[in-house]
Amino acid sequence: MRISSSLVFQTGLNTINAQQSDLMHLYQQIGTGQKMVTPADDPLGASQAINLSQSQAQNARYAANRAVANQNLGTEEDALNSLTSLLVDVRTRLVQVGNGTLSDADRLTLANVLQNARDTALGIANTTDGNGQYLFSGSKGGQPAFDAAGAYQGDALQRNIQADATRQVAGSDIGSDIFARAQPGTLAYTSAVPNTNAGTAVFGGPFIADRDATTGNPDARYSFAVEFTAAGYDVTPTDHSTVPPTVEATVSYPLAADATEMDLGHGTRVQISGTPAVGDTVTVDPLKTQNPNIFATLDNLVAALNAPSQGDAKATASLRNVLNTGMQQLASNYDNVLTVRASIGARMNELQALDGSGSQRNLGFAKALSGIEDLDYYEATTQLSLRKMALEGAGLAFQTIQGLSLFNLGSK
């Protein structure tokens, strides 16, 4: 077999170039710390690395979302903490009014205090987050939750934040569910007394006295319209468990002159003091069917405190009825705010748990990605030494082979 000089030179050059290419590839690996300089080095590994990088980036986005949700919930908790303190103060003031020792001037002063409390509550309701979005407006972040009259201006769409791949967390609460809702599941009642009543009857807190009655009212689903007659009082119940609510037949009851409670039927009673006039009315409703608005309640209380009542038995009875109704409504509002705050705490705890699992997941992604991409420097430096020796050997071999010729062979 004849081997031409050009073939010898070309073979030597190809061998040296291959060794130099391998050496250069090792230099690039060591310089970047990556096993894969190009996807061609490991196509499967490159595909897996892309998927892992995407999962890692998505996990980081969820972590950022959770940070936003935590910030919003922290802002909401601060706002509702202030509202809780305000409601406690207002209820304390109303108890002070109920002792009957305040003059009209004292009540005017207290009305001013309640008006300021009402304005403060409105400011809390229109709290904004760090981006200037109103917290309690639902999806209408650019719209104040409540107008000056205390009417809700937002919507019922919850502002959810994607906290994890399969979990969304509400980053705030809807204003109407905080400032215009009775506590969910409450069995409390309230009595509404028109100021047109001519008598001096004062109605206290309605309550369920018999939950086990044959036609009992265990879930506070009945309303009662009461009208006083010469013989006692007539009660017309309305059952709210049906759609539309069912108005039942009117039942008449006698009323003793010294009565302290009135039987409304369905196991429900209401406290009474003073003397009602014929034709006077009172309506007893479950708070959950009313959803009392904090601002409307405070407006009614301010108006009642501003009206003179000193020395007027009828006006005094009207004031006490407004106070009783307002205290019942504010008590339910207060409990409702505490319920919302408990929900905020539960969501913040969940976000903390999701942060923990997200951190563990990120460690897993980082470890898997490192196993695919990161260079083993011990192996790489060993290969580098071998490649350098191979390149030097290829060069020496080429020098030896290219020195062979017929003339050199013939002279030996």
Image: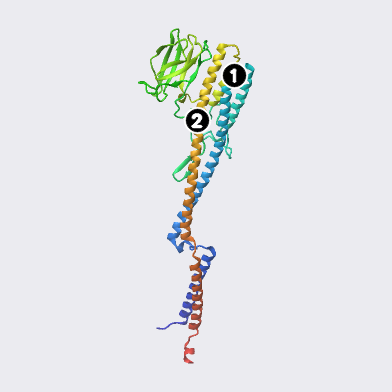
Going from N to C along the chain, the mark reached first, 2 or 1, is 1
Q: Position of residue 168 (x, y in %)?
A: 46, 41
Q: Residue flagged by tag 2: what amino acid is it?
A: Asn
Question: On the image, numbered disc 2 is attached to which residue?
Answer: 336
Q: What is the total number of numbered labels drawn onto the structure image?
A: 2
Q: Residue furthest front?
A: 258
In the image, what residue occupies the spot 50% across and 80% down? 396
Query: Label 2 neighbourhood size at 10 Å, few (<14), some (14-19), many (20+)?
Result: many
Image vertical order of residue 164 relative to residue 12, above or below: above
Query: Label 1 neighbourhood size at 10 Å, few (<14), some (14-19), many (20+)?
Result: many
In the image, what residue occupies the spot 49% across and 9% down? 277
Question: On the image, numbered disc 1 is attached to which residue?
Answer: 305
In the image, what residue occupies the spot 51% across and 71% down? 384
Image vertical order of residue 47 relative to residue 90, above or below: below
Report the quarter where the N terminus lies.
bottom left
Q: Is residue 45 visible?
A: yes
